[in-house]
Amino acid sequence: MNVFQVTLRNIKRPEVAKIIDVEAHNREQAAMLSERAGFRVALVKPIPMGDRKLKGKKNISRKELVKMFRALASMLRANISTADALMYYAQGLPDALLQGSLMSIRNRLEAGMPVHIAFAKERKFDTTIITMIEAGADAGKLHEAFTSMARKIKVEMAFSSKLRNALLVPCLVILFQIGLFIWSQISVVAQVEDTLKSIKQEPDALSKVIFSFSHVVRATWPFFIIALTAFIVGLFRSPNLRQTLLNFGMEKWRLLKKLVMGLRQTAYIGTLQMLYANGINLARASMLAAKVVQGTPTYAPLVEASQIYEGSGLPFAEALKKRPILDPQVMHMISIGERSASLPEQLEMLRDIYEEDTAQVMSDFTQIINVITLMCAMFLIGLVFAGAMLPIMLMGPKMMQSGM
């Protein structure tokens, strides 16, 4: 796949131009993909390999994947071929690189390549998506595979958004309050202390304690800021640090453990149901579903359970009991599904139950975080008041005595 730089000029105002990068097989395809209403293609120039910034390697956003899979599913249900559906969806897309990728997939399909391989060669889709596409194509239910993937990604986005909103605003509020407290200690309290010295008045006992605390803050605040910054950077850059803190929090706070395990089990059950219901055998489906919790302590037991199931001939529920990381309710319903040949239905029911339960736990968690944030804010505001306003109020009589 080549990358071209295409210059477009406004038809009515030729002095207005815009330049876009397009991934295509040749100049003609690049020009076709770059067409925009009100503009004409003025120049198509290939970009040398050394000048490329590998924009085509980036993954497609989850929001765009949801829209794309829904659109493709609807067109496939209308008996439009996969190749034509890709072409229709690609036309008019504002993202030229995604447009080029979809057209490349379409060209591979036209050349007779299997659909899952055509998608896999773009290297923009994870293993679960490629496996789902393969399963849907093999079962003749590719539209259902696209629909399932769109639903799964949308649920993941909803939970991620709720969790981010539950933590982001409180953390920003606390950081602001910490900054306000430090400023009050190194600026306002210092001015109050200097004012008392200027009128040659001894501070009372309470003010002495406040001033002594202010001295400590003034001496240590740069080190505190450096440590806090290092902690925040480490939190964003180190998965091991995040996992260690999360494990510690789960040990100490039952609600957090319930929330995290609910999110993990929702992701695992939802992926397992999606794969198994679309034709993937249970051993492979369980192994792939475990990848959605890779990097967490939940991953290894699920992989081991899958290996036990595949190698021992035990029922899947019994294999899960050998590595009991999931709730007993999950293993019980999987056992019922296996005995009654209704495992897809039982997994779907479990998925819906855990989505609802986790949403409720998320709501409770958000409310408690908001209360904790409010209490921290009130505590820091109290420290600011005690450090800045209280000495001023106590200084009033001293100033009056000094005036006399």
Image (tube, rainbow, N blue to C red):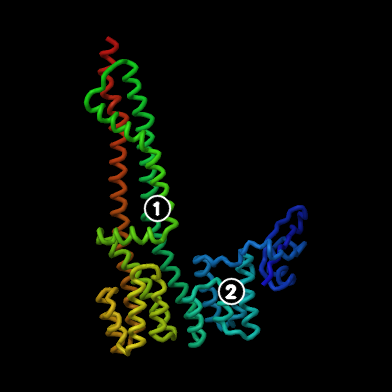
Work out whether residue 398 or residue 38 is closer to the camera in this orientation and state it: 398
Q: Residue lying farthest top?
A: 404
Work out whether residue 373 or residue 207 is closer to the camera in this orientation and state it: 207
Image location of residue 358, percent across then percent down: 32, 66
Q: How many marks?
A: 2
Q: Is residue 239 left or right of residue 78?
A: left
How crowded is the residue under tag 2: few (<14 C-alpha within 10 Å), some, or many (20+)? some
Residue at (32%, 19%) from the top-left corner? 197
In terms of image quadrants, where is residue 333?
A: bottom left
User: In the image, is residue 306 above or below residue 59?
Assistant: below
**In what element is the residue under mark 1?**
helix
In terms of image quadrants, where is residue 10?
A: bottom right
Q: Is residue 375 left or right of residue 15?
A: left
Residue at (40%, 79%) from the top-left corner? 287
Image location of residue 330, percent across then percent down: 28, 77
| Viewport quadrant of the N terminus | bottom right
In terms of image quadrants, where is residue 318?
A: bottom left
Q: CA distance from mark 2 to mark 1?
A: 34 Å
Image location of residue 158, percent across then percent down: 41, 64
Q: Which mark is residue 52?
A: none
The residue type indicated by label 2 comes to Glu
Q: Dot 1 corresponds to which residue?
A: 168
The residue type indicated by label 1 comes to Leu
Q: Dot 2 corresponds to which residue?
A: 122
